[in-house]
Image (tube, helix red, strand yellow):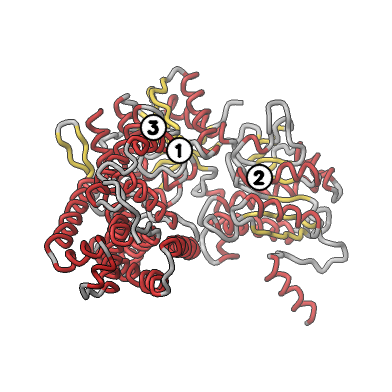
Amino acid sequence: MLFQQIVNGISVGSMYALLAVGFSLVYNILGIANFSHGAMIALGAFFSYWIARYLAVPVPVAILASIAFTGLSSALVELVTLRILRKRGQGSLYFFIASLTVFNLVTAVLVYISRGNIVSYPRAFLSGTFTIGNLYIPWIDAGMLLISIVCLAVLSYVMFKTRFGLAVRAASFSIKAAQLMGMDIDAIIQGVFFVSGTLAGVTGALLGVKYAVYPYIGNFVYMALFACVVGGLGNLTGAVLGGLLIGLLETLVSAYISSAISPALTFAFLVVILLLRPQGLAGRATEEKI
Amino acid sequence: MKRIALLLICTLLIGVVSFSASAADPIVVGFITALTGSTSLWGTQERNGAVLAADEINAKGGVLGRQIKLIVYDHKGQPAEGVSAYRRLVDQDKAVVVGGTHFSNISLAIAPVAEQKRVPIIGQAIEPKVTVPEPGKVNRYTFLAQPSSAQQGQMMARFGYENLGLRKAAVLADKSNSYSTSQAEAFAETFKALGGEVVSYIEYAGGTMDFKAFITQIKSKSPDVMFLPQYAQAGGLQVRQSKELGLNVTILGSNSLSDQNYIDACGGIQNAAGTYHLFNVNFDDPKFAPFHKAYEAKYGEPVQTYHTVFGYDDIYLIADAITRAGKVDPEAIRDALETIKGVPVLAGDGMFTMNPATHQPVSMPSWIFRWAADGSRVPERLIYPVE
């Protein structure tokens, strides 16, 4: 039973990891917690659902279309909030507030449109299960883990093997220096938002398939934040580790300690981790950016 | 012409249903349900039932020779809105009796206000505390007209143990919702009293989406039945995740699992087939033919959910109470509601009797349905609660 619970935990954790990586990406370059990530999760879930349901296209196609949409939406959010604030020389707190506003606005609009209903995909995608010995592994969980791994592989390729990635890393080191080197910093930041938006979109859509589509699904962004904090803010590897750890903790606490207070106990564990290692699991102690 | 225009406007504004040209003033009956919000489908179905019943009664000459004027307000699924709707009905519209709601949290909020305002309200909330806030005490002005959650949990346990021969039960309940926990407690208590074993009893935090940790735990105890007193969405997710983890046991559930949403949330009928759930009414019974005909004639579409019956039955129970009260007075109507005996209704076995000590129905049965592999719902049996 323990192994089955670990499998359950990893399946939850891999989603958190994927969410956390997208969240961490923006933090990495700007030192800002970007809560519009939650809006992109919710938009990803709803758009892939609407496309699959009303255009009657296969679910994977719907997910791909929705990812492109959330990437663009995220870039648009950057354009109408962060860029304006940056040009006016406003501090990061203002963007933090703006991103929370976007998150709440999108959630409110989705509540209105969906009338608060919870809906499920009309047909099964990645349904069923396979077994290894006594372990039951649902295809959707295996698929999500695989998609997480692919996304992370693509992301690390982009970050470490492309000029864009080099630019992002340079900018995350110092925006000013990167600008002095003649880089188009606006384009880089917008690119980061686009990538982060696509990651939120794919996770949102998969969460919708795995569980259900509902307006408050964007609240998973808080798990992304916690995963990042535990793993070390701004550290992509840390984000993955943090996500997996929280998923495992949640599951094992539910299974072996108490189900009804599992969320409370999970957070108590996280507080202990942070007391012992304030910079997070994989983080280095850094000075504040901007 | 002016009068007709006025009537039309009134109808549009407040959902007034029927008017009388007779000299006597109509009797104002209030109704509170969800006309907007996520549960508006249930609410509009309930209203349709209430309006249909009021029309039928008025067409036969009304009550005490006077027409019923039904005023329907929206509680939007929110307790505060429910309370203000009740106040408005009583204070402004001078309603003498009110029908609704079928939401436990909303009826719980209205009950103390009804005690102050002294205008009775009868609805289908499932939480027994709506009328019996604590043992030995009863809210004088609040009445319920469907089996309580405790009775529903009890009926399901008896059906599982006695009719299906199940012996080892697992129970999964939403800690944040009394609809869920009160059914779960009654189920476990009854199942054990009958001689069965509750091998796993899990209460989870509200809002949970991933139930695999609990299901893995349940599976290790090898039950032969799982009781899921849930709303359709959560119940469907639990069943889907159980199948994913290879737990294939009999599923017993609450009346919410009758929703089509349940099938989608299960990931398709292949997962939902075989689920047993409670249901207030057997619409396929031939005796419902006139009701279906009247409903379709009025609304141009078939009945969609069982909440229609709630509204319809409430109005007939109210009409009976006013008739027996003999006068249009809230206190007299209250007394008559308390002593409803053998009044024909659609729900259960078609007869309604009120228990004066609890303000809940006496021995009101429920149907148990099974989801079949072709996506239809098959009535299994009518089951009575044991008092």
Q: Nearer the viewer, mark 1 or mark 3?
A: 1
- Numbered mark located on residue B226 in the image: 3
Residue B9 percent coordinates (x, y)? 72, 74
Q: Mark 3: which secondary structure? A: strand
Q: Earlier in the sequence, mark 1 or mark 3?
A: 1
Residue B242 percent coordinates (x, y)? 31, 38
Q: Nearer the viewer, mark 3 or mark 2?
A: 2
Q: Amino acid at mark 3?
A: Met
Closest to the observer, A280 or A149: A280
On screen, residue B10 versus residue A46, left or right, reads right
Closest to the observer, B153 or A49: A49
Q: Verify CB contact (< 8 Å) between mark 2 and mark 1.
A: no
Which residue is at a point 77% across and 58% down the rendered structure image?
Answer: B68
Q: Earlier in the sequence, mark 2 or mark 1?
A: 2
Residue B174 percent coordinates (x, y)? 47, 38
Chain where mark 1 sits: B
Is residue B260 in view?
yes
Which residue is at a point 68% across and 33% down the rendered structure image?
Answer: B133
- Using the numbered discs, state the Cα–Cα distance from disc 3 to disc 2 in whole angstroms: 29 Å
- Using the numbered discs, state the Cα–Cα distance from disc 1 to disc 3 in whole angstroms: 18 Å
Q: Furthest residue to the bottom?
A: B1
- Pointer 2: residues within 10 angstroms few (<14), some, or many (20+)? many
Q: Earlier in the sequence, mark 3 or mark 2?
A: 2
Q: Amino acid at mark 1?
A: Ala
- Numbered mark located on residue B205 in the image: 1
